[in-house]
Image (spheres, rainbow, N blue to C red):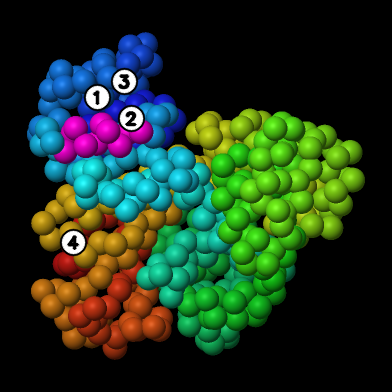
Amino acid sequence: MNIVIVGVGKVGKTLASNFINELHDVTVIDVDRAELEGVVNHYDVQGVVGNGIERETLDNANVSEADLFIACTPRDELNVLTCLLAKKAGAKFTIARVRQPELFSEVQNLRKDLGVDLLFNPDRTTAEEIARTLKYPSAKNVEVFAGGRALLVEFEIEQGNPIVDKDLMTVSRETGVSVLFAVVKRGNKVYIPHGDFVIRQGDGVMIIGSEKDINEFSKKLKIFKPSSKSVILVGGSKISYMLAENLLKNGVDVKIIEKDKGICYKLAEELPSATIIHGDGIDQSLLEEENVSRTDALVSLTDQDESNVMISLYALQKKVDKVVTKVNRTSTLEMAENIGLDTVVSPRNAVANQIIGFVRAHQSKFGKGLTTLYKLAPNVDAIEFTVDETFKYLDQPLKKLKLRSGSLIAGIVRDEGFVLPTGFTTIKATDRVIVVTSIKQVTDLQEIFR
């Protein structure tokens, strides 16, 4: 696909990198020549210096031939206006970043009139991701399929876990729970395992199943922790506000620590049910005063990666059950994942996954069934497809079909229930099929079969 990106900030750079890896043709636009040249030289993309609302700039970027146009400048209104101009110029699909909650809601209602096919809000996406992990504290990460009817949960196999040194067939037989091991991370290697795969201590595993079955499985493995009922948020950002709003609606006790007094007053006015504390979250004495060791969870959401890492390490030292760390820089993300932090979230990566899923769903005339995509590892995706009557292998037992190497049908959501696939399972029209695959750029369910 021909993709044009306006704005080469954190999100724009991340998108450009991901699209290049997916073998798309990318052009980037920005008013800052030096910043633009850095992106062009690093990612080997085309660059155009200029403002996205200028017709000459759009013409120089060949927007009339763009399959996808993405506006992610720091200004919400500019992003929406740029998308409108790009659509009028001939771009097939447009995506705009809108961070202001009020504007996001209004534009959502007027998307078609404004020529915007998809809106994304990095703060909202990140807040939703964190809220899911707080609901399942034993997990490092939680992804949702089919509107919550199926979950993909990641956790680490620690010393003493009863499945250590057992193959997956034995684990399934002994637990008797309908979950499927979709991915195993071991060191720098990632596996899509089969029944004879043996689990080792230290493995990072991802399982798929219904919420009920995953909870039961977690209890049998003695890793189950109840949902967090008290949470400390460090930093009064937009993510904190949206996350606190979500948690308070679900009966969670929320404290927010923020060092800017003006932001504290605003949060206290907008979130009257939360406890707002004026102070620096990196101050250990303040954290002790607020009984950090007695809270169920701590989420570090300041603007500084280093501060978030330090606060999270301190919380882990204090035996907080669930610790979530927000990081922005790629270098910090890699470091954070290697020093034993609990759950690490990256707003730019969360958004990239959302947009890549949109791109995959629209880049093939057969790809209309792709509804959800998550990148589980650099070369492994989890993809949800909705099956219609044109699917080639309807009502055929899976044991009679041949999957391409590096692919696994991890689950089927049928009506309101989750089906754990066996050799006798058939795929039916309207099923939602969850696939884990290392095949590049899968856009249609039929592509995983030989």
Identified by mark 4, the residue type is Lys
* Mark 4 vs mark 3, CA separation in Å: 32 Å
Toward the viewer: 393 or 311?
311
- Magenta portion: prevailing SS class: helix
Tell me the quarter of the image containing the N terminus. top left
Look at the numbered disc 3 and give the secondary structure of its residue: strand
Look at the numbered disc 4 and give the secondary structure of its residue: helix
Q: Which region shows up in magenta?
A: 77-87
Q: Residues within 10 Å of mark 3 (few under 14, many from 20)?
A: many
Residue picked out by circle 3: 30
| N-terminal label among 2 and 3 | 3
Q: Which circle marks residue 272 in the picture?
A: none
| N-terminal label among 1 and 2 | 1
* Mark 1 vs mark 2, CA separation in Å: 8 Å
Give me the residue at 53% from left, 35% from top.
Answer: 328
Look at the numbered disc 1 and give the secondary structure of its residue: loop
- Residue 191 at x, y percent in the picture: 43, 59
Tell me the quarter of the image containing the C terminus. bottom left
Is any atom of residue 196 visible in this view?
A: no
Give me the residue at 47% from left, 46% from top.
Answer: 101
Kindly check if marks 4 and 3 are in contact, taking CB atoms under 8 A apart as contact. Answer: no
Q: Which circle marks residue 78 in the picture?
A: 2
Give me the residue at 43% from left, 54% from top.
Answer: 376
Question: Where, by quadrant of the figure, is residue 116 drawn?
Answer: top left
Identified by mark 1, the residue type is Ile
Q: Is residue 133 left or right of residue 350?
A: right
Residue picked out by circle 4: 368
- Residue 207 at x, y percent in the picture: 49, 69
Residue picked out by circle 1: 53
